[in-house]
Image (cartoon, rainbow, N blue to C red):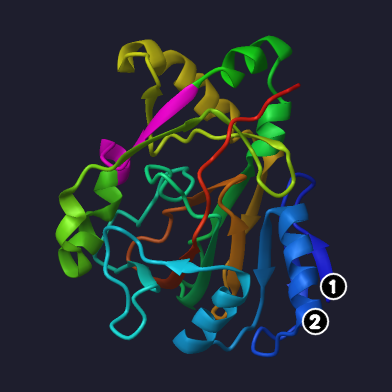
Amino acid sequence: MQLIPLSPALGAEVHGIDLLNMNDSLLASIHAAFLRYGVLVFRKQSLDPQSFLSFAQCLGEPIEYPFVKGLDAFPQIIEVKKLPDETLNFGGIWHSDTTYLPQPPKATLLLAREIPAVGGDTEFACQHHAYLGLSEGLRKVLLGLSAVSSSAKADVSRTREDRLRDAGKEQAKAALEASHPVVRKHPETGQAVLYVNIAHTARFEGWSDEESASLLQWLHQHQVRSEYRCRVRWEVGSLTLWDNRRVLHYPVNDYHGYKRLMHRITLAGDRPLAFSSH
């Protein structure tokens, strides 16, 4: 197994392995790389839905997405797609997946099925580096705060509309909310992670939306600074695995008039715990 870093902050391409042939040693190496780099890209993988699900099960417990139905025979696999006549792409805003759940997923796997000839990349940003980039004074303020995530913020809700029309679940109109520490402790590395995102974070716990807005706006700009990022260019058969507890992602919407189809699985996570500097 060879690892080629994508940027100083996070991300690596993984070469020399076939995800159809896993063993305990390889899985341990993948897990260690996952914790180190946050984003792993596997190229030229020939995975049908069952093989994709089987690999995901080697890494954790696949869970269903609350708003969009999965494939008929594989409810844990949802289609992330944009059709040629559509202008909005699914989840097309910086975010961490489903932070409005009490136990947000620990990881996401995205497998490219159809991609445009050019465009449709995904950007990622490391939120441990984002935390380290804060001043000592602001860190002290944030360590005492929690923030409320909502599934109903307008900008991200618009990006779901096309998929809700063709594959929406009965609870698709429900507004889900959960409160999490603004700085969470990564449950495996112990690192401090800035855990807010522009798509889902509505306000600080105990603050009004208006009181929260200015600080959240500054944090959202800070947490996606270029030095915290890497960028993944997709090919058919590319599978990207990322640590949803540490990484924000942003699917770039620059391929109007072309189809892009991905398969996505999320893995069960745990309830975020606050980081303590002591």
Q: Would you name the residue on which mark 2 appears? A: 16
Residue 148 place in picture, x, y as percent: 38, 30
Name the kind of residue labelled 1 in the image: Gln
Residue 59: x %, y % from top left: 62, 70
Q: Are discs 2 and 1 less than 8 Å apart at CB?
A: yes
Where residue 231 sits: x, y (%)?
Answer: 63, 54
Mark 1 sits on what residue?
2
- Label 2 and label 1: CA atoms lie apart by 6 Å
Q: Quadrant of residue 273?
A: top right
| Residue 276 seen in this snapshot | yes
The residue shown at (76%, 21%) is 278
SS under mark 2: loop
- Identified by mark 2, the residue type is Gly
Give the residues drawn in magenta, as a range. 146-156
Q: Nearer the viewer, residue 275 or 203?
A: 275
Please state which of residues 158 and 169 is positioned toward the viewer in this rendering. 169
For residue 48, say whether it is visible. no
